[in-house]
Amino acid sequence: MTDTVQRAGEAGSGRRSPLTHVPLSKTPLPALDPQLKPWPGEIETAGGVSLHTRRTPGSDEATAVYVHGLGGSSTNWTDLAALLSPFASGISVDLPGFGFSEPVEGFRFSLDEHADELGRFVEGLGAGPVHLLGNSMGGAVVLLLAAKRPELVRSLTLISPAMPDRRPDPRRLSDPLMALAYLPVIGRGVRKRLASLSARERAEQVIKLCFADPDAFPAHRLDELVEEHNARAELKWANAAMAASTFGIFRTWFARGAASLWAVAPQVRVPSLVVWGTQDKVISVRRAARTANALPRARLLVLPRTGHVAQMERPVPVARAVLGMWERLEGNAW
């Protein structure tokens, strides 16, 4: 494997620092099962927050909480949660308004509100500090949570997190048509186009955007995604949640001062791993070094031939990198 490993501070960060190896664990992992179905889901209430979750049975020595990106769901973590299950039990959540988590009345879908709801849920689990893993929008959410509630977090893994870009481009979001659908003037035409797409066409569009090699996405997983899209089409709050969360990301990207995610990241003191794909068409890899450099205890893993959802496209190297961090926590060697 020729994965690029680098420490924060390399090209694109504005300053240089010595190359630091990202340790990939040599501990044997479970065999990757390409036919593995999503873990069973249910509504779970903790800390007064009700979310749809998928639990991965595993070690009771630690708990990992997995958080999806914009337009994603708890099914985005099926393989990675399975690979890490001997080392931590897994809880993949659907954020409010996504998957099958119905938002409470008055929920406004800002990144801060998502982080607050998740924090109450994690605290209510009573599992002690957890390993937090987030992708895209979920990466921004867990970053905020780690900064606000460090006592809840044992380690942080960010996979292509939605870090700010002062030149936001709707094509850099997980569902570009949905991002455009709620804009003035042009939104009406986009909504008509969306309505004309079948669930399969929508699913294929998302995979094409998020994978470096869309043809490698398993056919049965595409069928699962189509089934989920069909089910969500019946949920009255799904489109509104998607639209509001999209603009929640935009608002955060334009925030300045202490409200900017670039200002929040230095407040995160837990060991952190940043993972990015060189062919990420959603959140550019150009932000990778700056993101890791902003985190006081972060290392950066850049994976070649990988798109926006490295945990789905390259679950084995991601699992080895995550486990490599977990193995070094006790000795403060990260």
Image (tube, rainbow, N blue to C red):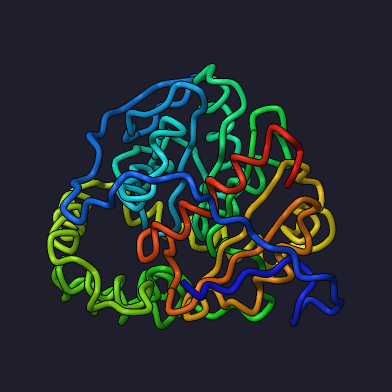
The one nearer the camera, 333 or 307, is 333
Which percent across, then down, holds residue 195?
20, 71
Horizontal arrangement in the rendering, residue 109 relative to residue 266 (left or right): left
Horizontal arrangement in the rendering, residue 10 relative to residue 152 (left or right): right
Q: Which residue is drawn at 45% across and 69% down?
A: 308
Q: Residue at x 49, y 53 (%)?
A: 320
Which percent across, then down, holds residue 30?
32, 44
Q: Compared with residue 212, is residue 109 higher up or lower down, i.e. above or below?
A: above
The one nearer the camera, 70 or 5, is 5
Residue placed furthest toward the top: 126
Q: Is residue 30 visible?
A: yes
Q: How many marks?
A: 0
Q: Which residue is drawn at 58% across and 74% down?
A: 4
Q: Compared with residue 270, is residue 297 higher up or lower down, i.e. above or below?
A: below
Name the image quarter holding residue 40.
top left
Horizontal arrangement in the rendering, residue 55 relative to residue 201 (left or right): right
Q: Compared with residue 49, is residue 284 higher up or lower down, i.e. above or below?
A: below
Which percent across, then down, holds residue 203?
23, 68
Q: Is residue 192 visible?
A: no
The one nearer the camera, 190 or 31, is 31
Q: Residue at x 43, y 71 (%)?
A: 179
Q: Compared with residue 72, is residue 2 higher up or lower down, i.e. above or below?
A: below
Which percent across, then down, holds residue 270?
73, 41
